[in-house]
């Protein structure tokens, strides 16, 4: 089994990075690994995926403009993106040290706040577009 850290350190620091199709395929694989890992280990991410599975198709049935449709979908995906970034940051902090430290708490709380702001954005967007339709 190959360690994720070693997969990303294959090239020497002064070797120019590959820009070919092989790099794209490899990067896609890392992204799929990240999504699968988040699904397995992050309950909040699973909840957000389930909301997306419901809300994105629902948006297709609403009589809204293309721009409004895009905003509805983007607001849901934004929550997932911020959650993934928050989870990555938390994992990096835990990798550095599992000790309780005020700066670790501040970073994790700030990441959580970013997720909350993204959720509020999604609620505002859905409310502004969907409530007038009701």
Image (tube, grey):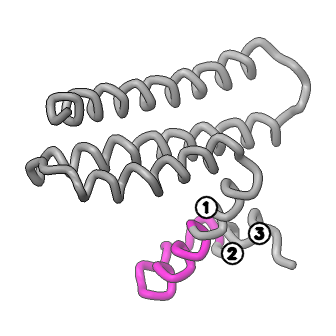
Give the mark toward the camera: 3 or 1: 1
Quarter-wise, where is residue 119 in the image?
A: top left
Q: Give the mark nearest the N terminus, 1 or 2.
A: 2
Name which residue lies at 58% across and 28% down.
Answer: 111
Q: Nearer the viewer, residue 128 or 110?
A: 128
For marks 3 and 2, give the CA distance.
Answer: 7 Å
Image quadrant in which the C terminus is located: top left
Name which residue lies at 61% across and 61% down.
Answer: 35
Quarter-wise, where is residue 92 in the image?
A: top right
Identify the magenta region. 12-31
Q: Give the mark nearest the N terminus, 3 or 1.
A: 3
Query: Quick check: 36 above or below 1?
Result: above
Where residue 8 appears, x then y in whole percent? 66, 68
Q: Secondary structure at mark 3?
A: helix
For marks 3 and 1, give the CA distance.
Answer: 19 Å
Q: Nearer the viewer, residue 29 or 113?
A: 113
Left or right, residue 48 beside residue 124: right
Name which residue lies at 49% across and 39% down.
Answer: 82
Quarter-wise, where is residue 124 in the image?
A: top left
For marks 1 and 2, give the CA distance.
Answer: 22 Å
Q: Secondary structure at mark 2?
A: loop
Location of mark 1 (residue) = 35
Location of mark 3 (residue) = 6
The reply to whether discs 3 and 2 touch (Cβ–Cβ < 8 Å) is: yes
Image quadrant in which the N terminus is located: bottom right
Q: Give the residue at the far front of this rendering.
A: 134
Name which residue lies at 82% across and 16% down.
Answer: 101
Query: Quick check: 109 above or below 89?
Result: above
CA neighbours of label 3 inside 10 A, class few (<14), some (14 to 19), many (20+): few
Confirm whether the magenta stretch covers residue 112.
Answer: no
Confirm whether the magenta stretch covers residue 30.
Answer: yes
Location of mark 2 (residue) = 10
């Amino acid at each position: 089994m190959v360690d994720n850290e070693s997969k990303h350190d294959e090239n020497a620091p002064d070797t120019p990075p590959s820009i070919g199709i092989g790099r794209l395929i490899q990067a896609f694989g890392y992204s799929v690994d990240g999504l699968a890992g988040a699904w397995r280990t992050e309950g909040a991410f699973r909840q957000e995926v389930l909301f997306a599975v419901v809300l994105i198709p629902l948006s297709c049935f609403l009589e809204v403009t293309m721009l409004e449709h895009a905003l509805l979908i983007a607001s849901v995906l934004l929550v997932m993106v911020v959650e993934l970034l928050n989870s990555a940051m938390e994992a990096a902090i835990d990798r550095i040290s599992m000790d309780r430290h005020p700066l670790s708490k501040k970073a994790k709380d700030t990441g959580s706040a970013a997720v909350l702001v993204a959720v509020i954005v999604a609620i505002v967007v859905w409310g502004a577009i969907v409530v007038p339709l009701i």
